[in-house]
Image (spheres, helix red, strand yellow):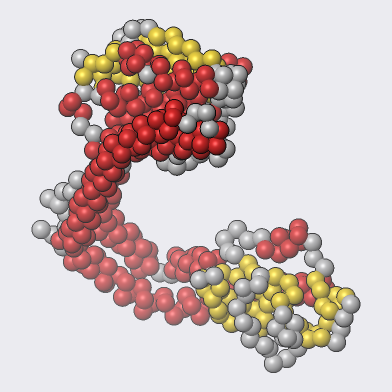
Amino acid sequence: MHSLRVGLLKWLIGPLMAANLLGAGLTWWLAWVPAQIAFDQSLADATWALIPRLRVVAGHVEVELSHQAEQMLRVDHLDSVYFVVRGEDGRTIFGDADFPPLREPELFNEPLPYDGSMRDEQVRIISLKTVIGNESVLIAAAETLRKRAVIRSEIMFSLLALESVLTLIVIATIWLAVARGLRPLETIRERLMARAPDDLSAVPQGDVPLELRPVLEALNRLLERTQAGALAKQDFLANVAHQLRTPLAGLRTQLEWVQHKHAEEPDTAHSAALMMSSLERMVRQTNQLLALARAEPSQFEKTGMQTVALHKLVENSVQHFVQEADKKKIDLGFELQPTSVTGDPFLLRDLVDNLIDNAIRHSPPGTSVTVSCRQLPDGTAGTLMVEDGGPGIPPQDREKIFDRFYRLDDKVAGSGLGLAIVRDIAKDHDAKIILGSGLDGKGTVFAVEIPLRA
């Protein structure tokens, strides 16, 4: 087993020592110090630019600076630039209110450069004291150090490039050493990138160098704990949802009895109707939690899949959704052709229910929802299509709608889990979801293409 550390030391110690002795001192003294002075002068010019904008209005110093002009002062492609103008009493007149306390220069109109920190990042600060009217004010500008770091690196490599043949040898040697030393890391990275997002199995350690084994062992322990936590979470979610079903069913029975018993009492009937509506939402969310736990891709076992008549599944879901559509005066139509797919009947039923429920919920009263299914001409897959008459989905939101708890319209009742369940079930079945617009660009069409396997 070879050692990554030994390999790097073997290739780097000699050239690095020579490069440090020959080039380090000259690089800093000949290039970086003048560059630092130039950066400070540029930042000082920004503070000077604010002085003509200061005016005394009603006995107070104010800054006459448009928003566009302020943005021009802050423009920088690499660094963040901050400004502040403060009065004698420490009051912020202009600029960033969270600017750190300023160091006051001993002389007026003499910039004072120093290092500081702002918003958890190191900055270079120029402080300038001047007089506006009869009041002394402090003007300061700060700039992050990213550009200086880039320039410092460029100066270092530029000067080293001008040195002797030894410098060229050092650069070539370092390149070879880094490429040789990091090759195992690149191999591990490629293996991890090639994994599926839900693959939490241990990373093989067969050909990994000695120094990387503790890292992979720690990573594997983390993956093991993550997998155990995911299993526990899904089991808990499924158990809770399943345990809630029985008491919720009993509560629904009792509420139906109350509605029937007190139908002639308006107040009681109204309260019972509100409770029944809340109960229906709770039942739906419980069912969605259970469906979400069943559909989790990392927990799904494809060994139990079978040939399913998709059109029969849709027919079995008709009655409930016809009643829901009638409540909103929505024309719910079905165009069902014999369609066979391979999958889990329970999960596919959840997929159908969530797509139709989503379409009805987001369609305004008086519109239509059409559910259709058909077999592809080559017989390799079946397609379920649900077309609604809703407002449609903007292109920029078409990926987000499948995220858990994401909702396009907060005014529509729901938990934001329906399409997340659809996405997980489609992934379980290697199905493809196609999202488009309806006729004349109105409404939304969800098409799910589910394979049929031998």
Q: Which residue is at a point 18% across and 62% down the rendered structure image?
A: 214
Q: Is residue 299 above or below residue 312?
A: below
Q: Is residue 115 above or below residue 306?
A: below
Residue 155 drawn at (x, y percent): 50, 68
Foreground residue, 317 or 152?
A: 317
Q: How many marks?
A: 0
The answer to whether residue 421 is seen in the rendering is no
Task: Determine the residue located farthest toward the left in the rendered image.
Answer: 1
Foreground residue, 137 or 257?
A: 257
Foreground residue, 237 or 282?
A: 282
**97 relative to 136 in the view: left or right:** left
Q: Quadrant of residue 344?
A: top left
Q: Quadrant of residue 6?
A: bottom left
Q: Which residue is at a point 32% across and 72% down the rendered structure image?
A: 16
Residue 451 drawn at (x, y percent): 30, 19
Task: Determine the residue located farthest toward the bottom in the rendered image.
Answer: 106
**Quarter of the N terminus within the rendering:** bottom left
Q: Which residue is at a point 55% across and 65% down the rendered structure image?
A: 147
The answer to whether residue 266 is seen in the rendering is yes
Residue 341 drawn at (x, y percent): 29, 16
**85 relative to 385 in the view: left or right:** right
**243 relative to 204 in the view: left or right:** right
Q: Is residue 323 above or below residue 149?
A: above
Q: Which residue is at a point 37% across and 19% down the rendered structure image?
A: 317
**Quarter of the C terminus within the rendering:** top left
